[in-house]
Image (cartoon, rainbow, N blue to C red):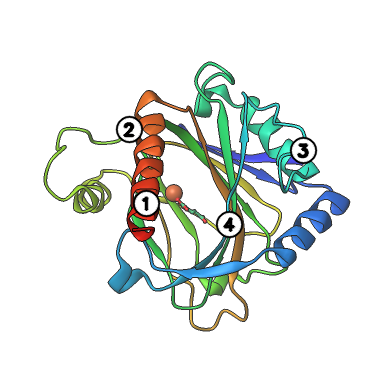
Amino acid sequence: MQVTQRGGRFVVVDDFLDAATLAELRRLMERSTFSEVDSVLYPETDGKAFRSRGTYVKGGGRGEDGAPGRSRAFERILQQVVAEPGIFGTAGQDWDRAGFTFWRYPAGSRLSWHNDAGGGRTGEFIVFLHEEWRASWGGELMILDEEPVTSVRDGDFLAQMELQVRESASSPVAIVPRPNRLVLVKAGTVHQINRVDPTAAAPRRTLTGFISKQTAESGAQARDALLRLVDRSAGEGQ
Ligand SMILES: O=C(O)CCC(=O)C(=O)O
Ligand SMILES: [Fe+2]
């Protein structure tokens, strides 16, 4: 394992997991159930991806005993997150929650420019899990390594990010989805997944997740969602 690239707002770690832990994580991925989802950003143009149900680990990086889907790989990711306070802040204080979701991006799909800000998120991690990725297969993770533009808060927020990339004096970094590579990205950083080339022989496979703090806001959102669900099921019973 070694850090091979370090930007102001991201870190790349190569040969991240040892062979046994990587194999175990791939088996967990194979056993997971995936569902087809529209892009939450641009459903018309991004194309469909596939995601597994998420697993959450709470409590400042130590995890909860018996949490579903716990694996050695999750612990290794959390260790790496704890080791990068410049990206995620301090465990327990700035973040206390980590989500883990497997994704598959088939040929022809992409994920447009976004920044994962909000919802108490401090950052995101990505581990590339496909067996092979050719340089011509596209699907690079593009990162604009600069402070988010916060001047325009209204209007089309996604278009604003597109504009930040377009008008920036610097260019995004293209991170090739090399197998067993971990990427850590600070929340607020504008990034996208380049479209996977039609010649890609297999989908782009990842384990990704957000590192976040359970905010009063997201707690309230969760409560509201629950109340809506309760309301609806009460309605159905009548
Ligand atoms: O898979 C990647 O490279 C990035 C995924 C991503 O940015 C996201 O899911 O928010
Ligand atoms: Fe993201």
Q: Amino acid at mark 2?
A: Glu
- Could you tell me the amino acid type at mark 4? Arg
Asked if disc 1 and disc 4 are in contact, CB closer than 8 Å, the reply is no
- At horizontal 82% and vertical 55% (from top left) the residue drawn is 24
Q: Residues within 10 Å of mark 3 (few under 14, many from 20)?
A: few
Q: How packed is label 4: few (under 14 Cα within 10 Å), some, or many (20 or more)?
A: few
Say if disc 3 is inside 8 Å of ligand 1: no
Choose between 129 and 166: the one closer to the eye: 129
Q: CA distance from mark 2 to mark 3?
A: 38 Å
Q: Which residue is nearer to you in this view: 100 or 110?
A: 100
Which of the numbered marks, if any, corresponds to residue 53? 4
Q: Nearer the viewer, residue 114 or 228?
A: 228
The residue to which callout 2 is attached is 147
Looking at the rendering, which quadrant does residue 59 occupy?
Answer: top right
First reached walking from the N terminus: tag 3 or tag 1? 3
Whole-angstrom CA distance, mark 4 to mark 3, is: 17 Å
Callout 1: CB less than 8 Å from ligand 1: no
Give the mark, 2 or 3, whose residue is nearer the N terminus.
3
- Amino acid type indicated by mark 1: Ala
Q: Earlier in the sequence, mark 1 or mark 4?
A: 4
- The residue at 20%/51% (across/down) is 163
Q: Please tell me the numbered disc located at residue 234.
A: 1
Quarter the C terminus occupies? bottom left
Q: Which mark is residue 66?
A: 3
Which callout, 2 or 1, points at the residue further toward the start of the chain?
Answer: 2
Q: Nearer the viewer, mark 2 or mark 1?
A: 1
Which numbered dot is residue 212? none
Q: Secondary structure at mark 4?
A: loop
For the residues marked 3 and 1, what is the alpha-carbon distance in whole angstroms? 32 Å
Q: Compared with residue 158, is residue 31 higher up or lower down, i.e. above or below?
A: below
Percent position (x, y) of residue 235?
32, 55
Mark toward the start of the polypeptide (2 vs 4): 4
